[in-house]
Amino acid sequence: MTKVDGSALESVAATALWTLRNRALEAARPKSPFSDPLAVQIYQAIDYDYAKFGRPSQSHPLRAMALDLAIRSHLDRHPGAPVVALGEGLQTTYWRLGGPRTDWLSVDLPPVIALRERLLPAEPHITGVPVSVLDRSWMDAVPTGTEPFISAEGLLMYLEPAEALALIADCAARFPGGGFFFDSIPPWFRDRTLSGLHLTARYTAPPMPFALTVSQTLRLPQEIPGVAAARDVPLPAGRGLWRYGFVKTLADLPPLRERRPSITLLTFDRPAG
């Protein structure tokens, strides 16, 4: 079978292949708690030098599991609400959730959307929107009067701080009652990427200018109009040490709490009336 060339994805867009590799390898492990057969399939269908990303990590598949749980919870409370996946990359969230019958918008750069459409099954509920998330025209594709779940998984850290905060603020103003899921890196890790973070001799991670500590994410309701609440989302249990509760306990102790990556779920103020 002829493989698809993945080299068209560059810089930040190439991180879609990094996270795909980590999810696929984890899903292929025996007895892994993470299941993603479609990720395994498209990982094997793309011709790319995955080895340059270095050793695989459980962090990306566990983050994906946390996203799945958050979307399920939102759809349980808001049946039929649309899902907006910003910077979705080669995520296969829709299929892991069993193909929910709801509008699903996949917003990403044109080369990424083109690769998604070539590799992933066509689904009537999924609409690809080939624009930068900074181009707010994607908002016009969200059905009006709904309370969407918006995911920004693995996205905000690649934006400038003002861009990331403005994106959250604009979503809160435009989509009252919605939810916004994102992950953050801590400031010390941001600084490493800005000075050149070499995962291997052949790959340097793109700069990640936007960083927040856990405390800073939890203060967002006081700082951004329209944000009603913020919750620190724990990673689900994984494999090896990641399966034990003491890992989470340690991660929540100061000063580790302020130095670890975090996942945050924001809820927006309810619609007036």
Image (spheres, grey):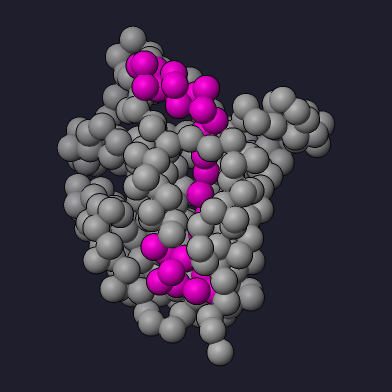
Near-viewer residue (140 or 56) = 140
Q: Residue at x 28, y 53 (%)?
A: 134
Q: Residue at x 70, y 26 (%)?
A: 256
Looking at the image, the residue that sits furthest to the top is: 201
Residue 215 visible in image: yes
> Residue 263, percent across and down?
58, 45
Residue 29 visible in image: no
Quadrant occupied by the C terminus: bottom right
Looking at the picture, does residue 199 appear above or below residue 150? above
Looking at the picture, does residue 188 appear above or below residue 75? above
Number of numbered tags placed on the structure image: 0
> Residue 69, percent across and down?
62, 57
Near-viewer residue (246 or 250) = 250
Looking at the image, the residue that sits furthest to the bottom is: 273
Near-viewer residue (235 or 241) = 235
The quarter holding residue 216 reads top right
Q: Residue at x 72, y 25 (%)?
A: 255
Report whether 46 appears left or right of 189. Answer: left
> Residue 38, percent across and down?
43, 50
Q: Residue at x 28, y 73 (%)?
A: 140
Quadrant occupied by the N terminus: top left
Span shown in magenta: 170-197
Q: Residue 193: within the magenta?
A: yes
> Residue 42, percent across and down?
35, 45
Looking at the picture, does residue 18 appear above or below residue 35? above
